[in-house]
Image (cartoon, grey):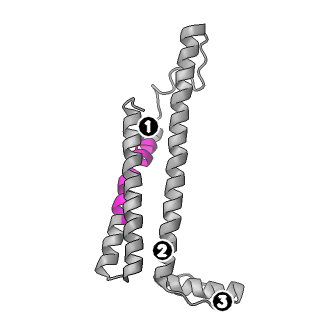
């Protein structure tokens, strides 16, 4: 089976016929709605996992500092100078995933909704895509603010 990006709908139908022996007719809009739900789910899970990791790092650093102050135990999971001599690539990737990605992602989904509005997508599908875009944009902004506050020493 040869896959052409311009014919995704036909490729999916061909896959169902070739591999499963099933002939299914559905609109491309249904796939788009399905994609909105998958993207929303994956984005929320990604941000939840990252937020949890960041909270755990902050908690672990707090425990390390308390052990050193109260019990004179110099226990450091990553070494004392690890955060001071952070590799350049890790700094770039950290900045990209924490700050640049949410902004780019928001711009992409907003652009997609604008294209849907221009192409006059049917009302139910347009409402779903607008609601998904609003939710994802709010999630992206919240994640961005969470990381910014955490980076500045907030909670």
- Tag 1, which secondary structure? helix
Contact between marks 3 and 1 (CB within 8 A): the answer is no
Structural distance between the alpha carbons of marks 3 and 1: 49 Å
Q: Which residues are magenta?
A: 92-109
Q: Which quarter shows the N terminus?
A: bottom right
- Identify the residue at image location x=42%, y=32%: 155
- Identify the residue at image location x=52%, y=73%: 34
Residue at label 1?
A: 88
Contact between marks 2 and 3 (CB within 8 A): the answer is no
Query: Foreground residue, 96 or 20?
Result: 20
Left or right: residue 36 compared with residue 131: right
101 magenta-colored:
yes
10 Å crowding of disc 1: few (<14), some (14-19), many (20+): few
Percent x, y for residue 58?
51, 29
Structural distance between the alpha carbons of marks 1 and 2: 39 Å
10 Å crowding of disc 3: few (<14), some (14-19), many (20+): few
* Vertical arrangement, residue 59 with respect to residue 26, above or below: above
Query: Which marked residue is nearer to the observer: mark 1 or mark 2?
Result: 2
Between disc 3 and disc 1, whose residue precedes? 3
* Vertical arrangement, residue 118 with respect to residue 71, above or below: below
Between disc 2 and disc 3, whose residue precedes? 3
- Identify the residue at image location x=43%, y=38%: 91
Magenta region, mostly helix, strand or loop?
helix
- Tag 2, which secondary structure? helix
- Identify the residue at image location x=32%, y=75%: 115
Residue at label 3?
A: 17
Structural distance between the alpha carbons of marks 2 and 3: 22 Å
Residue at label 2?
A: 33
Outermost right residue: 20
Q: Can residue 72 be seen?
A: no
């Amino acid at each position: 089976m040869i896959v052409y990006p311009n014919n995704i709908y036909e490729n999916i139908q061909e896959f169902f016929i070739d591999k499963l022996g099933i002939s299914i007719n559905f609109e491309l809009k249904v796939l788009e709605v399905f994609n909105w739900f998958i993207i929303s789910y994956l984005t929320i899970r990604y941000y939840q996992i990252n937020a949890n990791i960041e909270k755990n790092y902050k908690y672990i650093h707090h425990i390390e500092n308390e052990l050193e102050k109260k019990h004179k135990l110099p226990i450091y999971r990553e070494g004392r100078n690890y955060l001071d001599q952070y590799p350049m690539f890790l700094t770039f990737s950290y900045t990209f995933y924490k700050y640049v990605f949410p902004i780019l992602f928001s711009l992409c989904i907003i652009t997609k909704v604008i294209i849907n509005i221009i192409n006059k997508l049917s009302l139910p599908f347009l409402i779903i895509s607008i609601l998904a875009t609003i939710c994802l944009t709010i999630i992206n902004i919240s994640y961005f603010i969470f990381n910014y506050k955490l980076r500045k020493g907030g909670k």
